[in-house]
C-alpha cells in the first residue's frame, strides 16, 4: 500500500504530493509554487509576502460568515537529515514507506514535521461538506532554522482572531505553551601546524546515534556524538601528546547530533595503547547507553598522515570546551509536571576555511531569564577557552492561557469524537506561536497534531491511525467555532 491510498484519503493524498516536492529550509521555492498552484487549482485566493510566506483564504460556509476567522498554521520547510550523505534534498523527492501502522522514509527524515500539518490545512480548505467560518491557511518559511517566516510575517497577511498551529507531535494532547530559544555560536580561530611525522594518525567515527529533536527529545537522554567524541579525545590528551587535524560533528542547531568524527595523531610508540583505550571506551558507552542507543557505532581506522593539524593550544582549548560544555536538560518545569523547562544542545562543530572552527549550540526555556542564564553560561565557558561568542536574536516562548476558549473547543471536539479528554500541555520545542502572539496579542491559540516519532532524524515516522484522529479533531473544531458564533 502507498501513502496516497491511506485514510484520511484527502489528507494523505496531499501529504504524498508534498513529500515529492524538495523543501529544505531557506530553499522553499518549489514548495511555495506547489502551494500557490494548489490554491489556483481549487479556486482559492492566495498571496505571498516578501519573505516567502503563503496565505490561502477560503470564504465561510454560507450562513456562517459572521463566525470568527480561523488561521490554520504550519510551516513549509523540513529538516534534512540522511543516513546517506550524498542524498540531494534540494532535488530528490522523499521515498516513503508504509510500515504497518507507521509511515517512514527510506534513510531520510520524512518531513511529516510539518508536512502533515500543511496537508491537513489544505485538505480542510477543500472539504466540500465541512461547515466552517472564514479560513486562512498561513504556511511559513524557514521555521526549522530560524523561524524567519514568523519573524518577518508581512503586514496584513492574516486577519483571524483564532490560530490553530498544526505542528505538534502527540495524539490526544493539546498544547497551550512552548519554550523560547536562542542560539549561541562560538568561533575558534586557529593556526595550521605541520602534522608531526613521527605520529600515527587515526580517524575516529561516532555514527548512527538516535539523535532526534533537541526540544521534544532532549529529556530522553540520548547520546550526543559531539560530547562522546570530545570525551574520548580529552581522555587521550591526559595521557599522551595528541594532534587534532580534523573535527566535524552534528548538522542542525535543533537536532541532537547523531554522528561526529575527528582525525587525530599520537606518537607512533603509543598507537597500540590508543586502540586499547578505544575498546575500553566502547565498552563503557555500550554500558551507559544500553537500550537507549541500539545502533550507535564507534570505530577507528588508520589514515595517511595529513599535511596540517590544528595548533596545539587551540586543539586542547577546543576539546576541553566541548567536553565540559553543558548538554541536555538543565531544569524541569514547576508549572507543568513532566515538562522540561530549560535545556541546551551542543549541536554542531564545523571547520571553516583554513583557520576557523565554529561550534553551534542552542538553548531553550519557557522562562525567558533562564533561557538567557544558560546561554550566558555557555558563553562564559567558551570565552574561557578563547573563542569568540555571539548570541542570535532568539525567539519568545508562549505562556499558557488555561482559560483559552479555543482550547476548550478543541478539547471538547476530541472528547466528543473519541470519548477521551485530551491532555493539556506545554511543549519544550519551539513553536511559532510565541512570535505570532508577540505581533498579534489578541490571538487565541492552541497547537495539536498526530503522533510523530524520531523527528529531525532519519528514524522519523508518523502514526497512521493518529492522522485520522487529528484530522477529524481539526474538522470538528472548525465546525464548533463556526456554530458557537452563529
Image (cartoon, grey):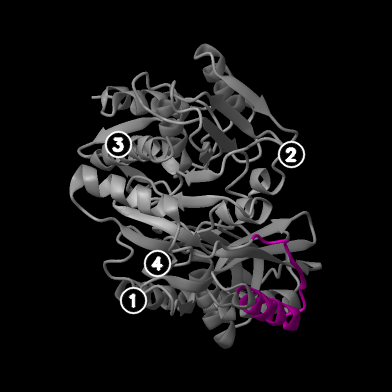
Disc 4 and disc 3 in contact, CB within 8 angstroms: no
Residue 359 included in the magenta stretch of the image: no
Q: What's the magenta region?
A: 371-395
Residue 229 at x, y percent in the picture: 52, 69
Which label sits on residue 155?
Answer: 2
Label 2, label 1: how many angstroms apart (C-alpha)?
52 Å
Which label sits on residue 288?
Answer: 1
Which residue is at a point 34% across and 28% down the rendered structure image?
12
281 is higher (above) or lower (below) than 124? below
**Which of the two labelled residues, at mark 4 and mark 3, occupies the earlier sequence position?**
4
Label 1, label 3: how many angstroms apart (C-alpha)?
43 Å
**Which of the two labelled residues, at mark 2 and mark 1, occupies the earlier sequence position?**
2
> Which circle, 1 or 4, is nearer the viewer?
4
- Give the class, few, some or many, for how many residues have Cα within 10 Å of label 1's Cα (few <14, many ≥20): few
For the image, the number of numbered tags is 4
Element type at marker 2?
Answer: loop
Amino acid at each position: 500500500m502507498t501513502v496516497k491510498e491511506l485514510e484520511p484519503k484527502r489528507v494523505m493524498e496531499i501529504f504524498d504530493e508534498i513529500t515529492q516536492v524538495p523543501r529544505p529550509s531557506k530553499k522553499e521555492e518549489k514548495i511555495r509554487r506547489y502551494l500557490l498552484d494548489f490554491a489556483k487549482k481549487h479556486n482559492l485566493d492566495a498571496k505571498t509576502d516578501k519573505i516567502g510566506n503563503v496565505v490561502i483564504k477560503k470564504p465561510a460556509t454560507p450562513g456562517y460568515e459572521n463566525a470568527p476567522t480561523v488561521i490554520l498554521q504550519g510551516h513549509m520547510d523540513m529538516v534534512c537529515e540522511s543516513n546517506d550523505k550524498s542524498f540531494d534534498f534540494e532535488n530528490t523527492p522523499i521515498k516513503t514507506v508504509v510500515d504497518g501502522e507507521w509511515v517512514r522514509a527510506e534513510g531520510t527524515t520524512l518531513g511529516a514535521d510539518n508536512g502533515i500539518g500543511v496537508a491537513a490545512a489544505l485538505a480542510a480548505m477543500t472539504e466540500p461538506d465541512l461547515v466552517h467560518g472564514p479560513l486562512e491557511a498561513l504556511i511559513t518559511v524557514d521555521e526549522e532554522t530560524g523561524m524567519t517566516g514568523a519573524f518577518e510575517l508581512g503586514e496584513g497577511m492574516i486577519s483571524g482572531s483564532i490560530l490553530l498551529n498544526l505542528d505538534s507531535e502527540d495524539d490526544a494532547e493539546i498544547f497551550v505553551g512552548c519554550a523560547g530559544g536562542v542560539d549561541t555560536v562560538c568561533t575558534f580561530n586557529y593556526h595550521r601546524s605541520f602534522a608531526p611525522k613521527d605520529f600515527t594518525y587515526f580517524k575516529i567515527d561516532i555514527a548512527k546515534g538516535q539523535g532526534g529533536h533537541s526540544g521534544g527529545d532532549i529529556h530522553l537522554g540520548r547520546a550526543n556524538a559531539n560530547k562522546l567524541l570530545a570525551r574520548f579525545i580529552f581522555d587521550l590528551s591526559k595521557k599522551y601528546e595528541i594532534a587534532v587535524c580534523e573535527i566535524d560533528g552534528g548538522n542542525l542547531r535543533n537536532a541532537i547530533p547523531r554522528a561526529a568524527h575527528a582525525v587525530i595523531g599520537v606518537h607512533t610508540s603509543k598507537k597500540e595503547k590508543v586502540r586499547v583505550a578505544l575498546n575500553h571506551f566502547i565498552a563503557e558507552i555500550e554500558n551507559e547507553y544500553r537500550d537507549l542507543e541500539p545502533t550507535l557505532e564507534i570505530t577507528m581506522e588508520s589514515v595517511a598522515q595529513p599535511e596540517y593539524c590544528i595548533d596545539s593550544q587551540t586543539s586542547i582549548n577546543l576539546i576541553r570546551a566541548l567536553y565540559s560544555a553543558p548538554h541536555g536538560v538543565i531544569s524541569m518545569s514547576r508549572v507543568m509536571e513532566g515538562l522540561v523547562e530549560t535545556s541546551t544542545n551542543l549541536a554542531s562543530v564545523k571547520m571553516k576555511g583554513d583557520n576557523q572552527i565554529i561550534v553551534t549550540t542552542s538553548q531553550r526555556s519557557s522562562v525567558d531569564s533562564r533561557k538567557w542564564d544558560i546561554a550566558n553560561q555557555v558563553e562564559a565557558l567558551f570565552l574561557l577557552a578563547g573563542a569568540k561568542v555571539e548570541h542570535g536574536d532568539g525567539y519568545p516562548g508562549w505562556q499558557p492561557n488555561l482559560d483559552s476558549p479555543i482550547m476548550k473547543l478543541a478539547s471538547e471536539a476530541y472528547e466528543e469524537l473519541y470519548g477521551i479528554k485530551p491532555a493539556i500541555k506545554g511543549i519544550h520545542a519551539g513553536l511559532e506561536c510565541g512570535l505570532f502572539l508577540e505581533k498579534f496579542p489578541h490571538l487565541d491559540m492552541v497547537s495539536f497534531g498526530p503522533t510523530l516519532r524520531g523527528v529531525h532524524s532519519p528514524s522519523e515516522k508518523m502514526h497512521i491511525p493518529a492522522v485520522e484522529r487529528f484530522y477529524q479533531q481539526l474538522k470538528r473544531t472548525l465546525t464548533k467555532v463556526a456554530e458557537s458564533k452563529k
